[in-house]
Amino acid sequence: MASALLNSPTFALQPAPEQLALSTNYITNFNFLNQYLPDTYEKEFERYGNRTVSSFLRMVGAEMPSNSDQVKWAEQGRLHIKYTSCTSGAAIGSATAIITVADANVTAIAIRVGQTVMIQNNTTGVYNKAVVTAVNTTTATFTVAYYEAAGQAFAIAGGATTVCTVFIYGSEFKKGTSGMVGSLEAEDSIYSNKPIIIKDKYTVNGSDMAQIGWVEVTTENGAAGYLWYLKSEHETRLRFEDYLETAMIEAVPAEVGSGAIAALGQTGVAGSAGSEGVFYVVNNRGNVWGGGTPTSLSDWDSIVARLDKQGSIEENVVFVNRGLSFDIDNMLATLNGWNTSGAANAASYGLFDNDVNMALNLGFSGFRRGYDFYKSDWKYLNDPTMRGGLNGTAASATGTITGLLVPAGSTSVYDQIMGKNAKRPFLHVRYRASEAEDRRYKTWITGSAGGAATSDLDAMEVNFLSERCVCTLGANNFVLFRYG
């Protein structure tokens, strides 16, 4: 069924800011022969409400200084050992077999003589248990002797090697033998990010600063007055503050051969321009729900099952656009006794502390299904001037993001710059700072107007600058909801 909302008229993206103050911002009609005065509303009407979109990182993260061009941290690897791309060349019924580990990014296998392993065929699911009798780290192979008298339980598929999964569950040694040969070193995953420099500027000439308008202007930060340049300066500041957050969310590293590297970084050097934003990191190292919005309990069960395999963080916040928010509400409403038309039956009034004479609360703030999930609307995903203006249907929205699951709390990491373990929120911002320079949020005025006396320019220039990056710790605990 087509939407009943017509495409015209629609929400307006204009008027948008201009680079110059326009003459139309001031009174131009000085016809004193007109005996009628217009009845004017002096104050601007705030038809779009609060237009800012920032607050996400302030809710879930923190800001900390850094004194380097690069931020590095180490994240723990798995405690137990498992390989999922192993091959066995032995025939069915063999008492022993040579297993080859072919997993990607494995430089030295961590299996030792005497350890007991489970070996399962990836295709059929049949398995054996065995003890390791020999290991060759050079060729990434190890020999096993099966516990089962029937020998290897799975056949060689089509005369080729058989792919299987191996994990260690213990060890067993003869009486009177020496101890375990060799030891294992903990393996960390090292990640890094680089800060980017974000700038903005507002300029007004001295003459326009002396011009009084008839409209009382206001902004979201409480600024008010009859001087139009005050509004433009404050909106530039608000826009810059929004970009401080959205740049951390959307930033991507420049690829080798890209125009951005040639314009901003060292030609041909990967990572010399751009930064790793939250969406980029979760897309590459986190969990991705590719179906747009999970609409059923079974969908969330699959998400819970994935979280079980990751860090199993107890409390999580799901930042959602309007579509995902309604889908969650509808799913929970159905479970709670509402009918398919959205009307509540008698039981629902008591559950939601509602009665028949008051407006029903049709929304949910959270639910528990294995873990605690708290739902929060994310204005950035709804705002039509940001991601809210992108395609939003499964047929045309490959890559359109509908929400982000963020683990709550903090995690312990080894900070390479500080040289020690530290507690950090899963999401936090690092900005450049030292005793001589703090680049978290710099603003300064130049020119010869508005109190500035730094040059002979008959204008006031308000400059903004920040240098920062976002650190996404434990991206494997995040879930990105998107189409495609």
Image (spheres, rainbow, N blue to C red):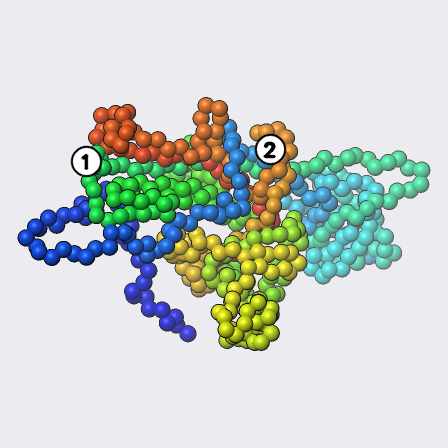
State the mark number for residue 415.
2
Q: Position of residue 44 (x, y in %)?
A: 28, 52
Q: Position of residue 163 (x, y in %)?
A: 69, 53
Q: Residues within 10 Å of mark 2 (few under 14, many from 20)?
A: some
Q: Nearer the viewer, residue 53 or 475?
A: 53
Give, as a three-letter code, the residue at label 1.
Ser
Asked whether residue 432 is in view, the answer is: yes
Left or right relative to 4: residue 422: right
User: Looking at the picture, does residue 366 appear above or below residue 228?
Assistant: below
421 or 450, nearer to the observer: 450
Measured as percent of width and height from the top left, residue 446 is found at 29, 29
Element class at badge 1: helix
**Total numbered labels:** 2
Secondary structure of the residue carrying numbered label 2: strand
Residue drawn 37% across and 33% down?
Answer: 443
- Residue type at the position of mark 2: Asp
Which label was assigned to residue 207?
Answer: 1
Q: Residue at x 44, y 31 (%)?
A: 439
Q: CA gap, disc 2 to disc 1? A: 52 Å
